[in-house]
Image: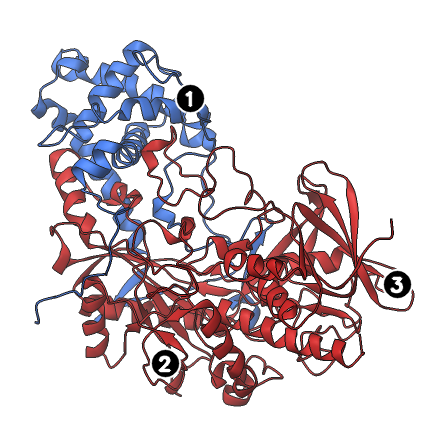
Chain colours: A red, B blue
């Protein structure tokens, strides 16, 4: 049997791959979507509503008994991390795209806000993003569904922030506040980050992939862990080779175009694994830049107790986790002594675990009473900072260790340079200042930054010597190979990246479909 | 300080990057090895997996002193001793300390009060445990204090990340050396951590005591009315 040759083979089915597949299919492109994990059903497979005492060791696993997926980075499931994300959907601003121009630090994107704004619009219209139109220059408004009311704890923080000249706004999330396209509105039940069993929260499987499959133009190859992107002697990507997750046999999927979209670090690892005589250090790495400029967000999470809520009756405000957001504000202060900025997410704790209880002093009835009083008042406050690229921060392959599929593990190297240390100190100071105004008792303060939201490694740029992909997410080296996920970010912003990943994917889809229509691919 | 010395290198290695979810403090203490469901019988009287029946009795008494019965059940009725036994049975690094600590409690009860541990009254328990609890709390506070320094007019939180290696955590063997004079303090911290985690993840602790009220349908999220200040 002649093997089918697809128009586009996409590796990975999360925010990047799922959006790309759907937008291509809409334009008549035939897509193979290759995902390392199984098909998972957000309605039945996750422990969305589980409580710890249902398990002997009290640890709530991601999947329900007998359900597979999300066991390693290479075998998550159809939908990828969007099945378990927190759905924060923020637009980047012009300042985020042009850091070097604004501040002489970091890297400019080759595209500007105006290039991506129409795609932010399109994504908001199709996935549903709630939020308030705040008119902030640095956090552009979008096509929003109504916002979710703030929790009492958010109102307390909002007042505290306002007294310091800063601002708390309604969070913007890809979660429905009104029904849309046969998806119900959020009903504030369950733990969003353990899966949303009604698809009020966007996930790429239900919102992008399954509808696209109905068009007949998207074929999903699940349980297929891609281990190599294939390349011809003519320097063209011809498809991918995969290892089947279950029966461990190898197979191939062929296409005219290949797009790698399997999450930042795994995309870098896949290109590094795809070695050839032409590309001895990894595919599309003639610049030597592959894996460099790894710029994850860094956080400094503080735990505290809001005195105004201590001893009050607990309410069901697990809600859809966080309802508020503290947008960047320090960027307007030129005297701050460092480059770039931070924003803060807060109040996104689910209340089915109280691990903080053991950190309270004492024992006996006094201890028990103290824990009970703190429970409705416990609050987390987590500023997110932007990291600048530096030579000590990169991704590579572990020379020795392999995963259970025999593939080398990816390694993350992160060096906090002076700017990160200064920014980290300042964002924690600011957080504490706001929390003190909010009459919070501080329980724990972080001693060092922690990473989150992995970005960079396949940097986008106009210069093939200093970047891996061009402004259309196409690799400089291979004319029919694309990378479409967070790895292409030249700078990270302090804002959650998923909305921008989806908008980039929609933009790349237009570019790819346009090339195909013109017969260029 | 040179630029290089200011730089801090952190190898995250091959693990998934740490994520703000779940919160570090939500990690259940001391569980590196997980029990799988079905490893313990679902019904019938509990047969300890690690502790002897005598040790289990002391453990149960201690857990109920740490989280006693009030208007809601205490640790024993919440199944905490069983939880601790399960965790310690598979996370073997805790075993020497747990065993040494329980045996120390029994001998202290005899030495100081000439009584069996199980018959100590509330006052005697406090006499025995309060110094340990105070030492644990003082230590936790001092760790927190290294993270800020007082300056004229206030306090500055300071997080210098340097290339100096972080203080090495004592090897498990040292931590659990039963002849260490600080053993009782470390034992109390272990038991408090396990008791707290076990209790507040139990049905009794989470639902009855804390009043967890999530997992319920809400047509609308209520507008908050915080009193204006």
Q: Splitting the image into 4 quarters, where does residue A370 fall?
A: top left
Q: CA distance from mark 3 to mark 2?
A: 50 Å
* Res B2 visible: no
Q: Quadrant of residue A380?
A: bottom left
Q: Are marks 3 and 2 on the same chain?
A: yes
A81 in relation to B35, above or below: below
* Residue at (26, 50) in percent of width and height: B217
Asked whether A463 or A232 is in front, the reply is A232
In which quadrant of the rendered view does residue A20 lie?
Answer: bottom right
Q: Residues within 10 Å of mark 3 (few under 14, many from 20)?
A: few
Quarter of the C terminus of chain A within the rendering? bottom right
Judging by the rendered image, the residue that carries numbered circle 3 is A232
Which type of secondary structure does the marked residue at label 2 adopt? helix
Instruction: Specify the subunit that label 2 lies on.
Output: A
Circle 2 Cα neighbour tier, 10 Å, few/some/many (<14 / 14–19 / ≥20): some
Q: Is label 1 in contact with label 3 (beta carbons under 8 Å)? A: no
Q: To which chain does the residue with label 1 belong?
A: B
- Which mark identifies residue B89? 1
Q: Position of residue A86 (x, y in %)?
A: 41, 59
- The residues tagged by marks 1 and 3 sit, at their Cα atoms, a distance apart of 56 Å
- Dot 3 or dot 2: first in sequence order is 3
x and y percent of residue A184 in the render?
A: 36, 59
């Amino acid at each position: 049997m002649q093997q089918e040759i697809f128009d586009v083979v996409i590796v990975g089915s999360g925010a990047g791959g799922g959006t790309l597949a759907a937008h291509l299919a809409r334009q008549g492109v035939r897509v193979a979507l290759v995902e390392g994990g199984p098909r998972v059903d957000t309605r039945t497979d996750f422990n969305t509503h589980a409580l710890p005492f249902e398990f002997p060791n009290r640890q709530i696993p991601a999947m329900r008994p007998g359900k597979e997926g999300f066991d390693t980075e290479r075998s998550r499931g159809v939908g990828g991390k969007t099945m378990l994300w927190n759905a924060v959907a923020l637009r980047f601003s012009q300042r985020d795209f042009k850091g070097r121009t604004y501040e002489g630090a970091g890297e400019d994107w080759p595209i500007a806000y105006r290039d991506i704004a129409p795609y932010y619009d399109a994504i908001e219209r199709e996935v549903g993003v709630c939020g308030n139109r705040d008119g902030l220059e640095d956090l552009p408004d979008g096509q929003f569904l109504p916002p979710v009311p703030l929790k009492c704890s958010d109102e307390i923080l909002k007042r505290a922030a306002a007294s310091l000249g800063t601002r708390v706004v309604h969070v913007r999330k890809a979660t429905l506040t009104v029904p849309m396209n046969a998806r119900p509105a959020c009903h504030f039940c369950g733990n969003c980050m353990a899966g949303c069993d009604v698809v009020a929260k966007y996930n790429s499987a239900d919102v992008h992939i399954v509808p696209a499959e109905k068009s007949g133009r998207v074929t999903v190859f699940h349980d297929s862990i891609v281990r190599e992107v294939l390349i011809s002697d003519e320097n063209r990507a011809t498809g991918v080779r995969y290892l089947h997750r279950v029966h461990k046999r190898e197979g191939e999927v062929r296409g005219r175009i290949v797009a790698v979209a399997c999450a930042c670090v795994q995309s870098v690892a896949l290109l590094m694994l795809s070695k050839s005589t032409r590309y001895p250090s990894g595919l599309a790495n003639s610049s030597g830049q592959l894996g460099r400029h790894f710029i994850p967000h860094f956080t400094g999470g503080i735990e505290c107790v809001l005195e105004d809520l201590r001893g009050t009756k607990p309410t069901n405000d697990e809600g859809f986790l966080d309802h508020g957001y503290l947008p960047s504000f320090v960027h307007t202060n030129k005297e701050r002594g460092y480059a770039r900025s931070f924003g803060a997410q807060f109040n996104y704790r689910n209340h089915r675990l109280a691990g903080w209880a053991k950190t309270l002093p004492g024992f006996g009835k006094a201890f028990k009473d103290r824990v009970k009083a703190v429970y409705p008042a416990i609050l987390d406050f987590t500023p997110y900072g932007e990291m600048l690229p530096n030579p000590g921060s990169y991704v590579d392959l572990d020379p020795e260790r392999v995963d259970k599929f025999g593939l080398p593990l990816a390694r993350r190297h992160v060096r906090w340079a002076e700017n990160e240390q200064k920014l980290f100190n300042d964002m924690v100071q600011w957080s504490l200042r706001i929390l003190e105004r909010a009459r919070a008792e501080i329980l724990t303060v972080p001693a060092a930054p922690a990473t989150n939201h992995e970005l960079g490694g396949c940097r986008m740029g106009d210069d093939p010597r200093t970047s891996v992909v061009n402004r259309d997410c196409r690799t400089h080296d291979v004319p029919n190979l694309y990378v479409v996920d967070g790895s292409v970010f030249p700078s990270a912003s302090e804002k959650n990246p998923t909305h921008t990943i989806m908008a980039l994917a929609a933009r790349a889809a237009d570019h790819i479909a346009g090339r195909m229509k013109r017969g260029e691919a | 300080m040179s630029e290089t010395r200011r730089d801090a290198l952190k190898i995250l290695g091959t693990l998934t990057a740490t994520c703000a979810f779940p919160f570090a403090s939500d990690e259940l203490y001391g569980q590196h090895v997980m029990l799988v469901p079905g490893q313990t019988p679902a019904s019938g009287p509990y047969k300890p997996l690690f502790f002897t029946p005598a040790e289990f009795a002391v453990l149960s008494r201690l857990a109920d002193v740490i989280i006693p019965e009030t208007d809601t059940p205490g640790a024993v009725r919440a199944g905490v001793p069983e939880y601790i036994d399960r965790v310690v049975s598979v996370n073997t690094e805790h075993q020497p300390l747990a065993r040494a600590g329980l045996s120390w409690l029994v001998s202290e009860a005899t030495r100081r009060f000439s009584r069996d541990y199980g018959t100590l009254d509330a006052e005697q328990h406090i006499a025995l445990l309060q110094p340990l609890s105070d030492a644990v709390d003082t230590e936790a506070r001092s760790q927190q204090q290294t993270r800020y320094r007082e300056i004229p007019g206030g306090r500055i939180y300071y997080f210098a990340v340097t290339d100096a290696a972080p203080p090495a955590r004592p090897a498990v063997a040292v931590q659990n050396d039963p002849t260490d004079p600080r053993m009782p303090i470390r034992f109390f911290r272990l038991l408090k951590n396990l008791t707290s985690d076990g209790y507040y993840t139990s049905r009794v602790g989470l639902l009855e005591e804390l009043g967890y009220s999530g997992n319920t349908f809400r047509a609308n999220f209520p507008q908050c009315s915080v009193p204006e200040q």
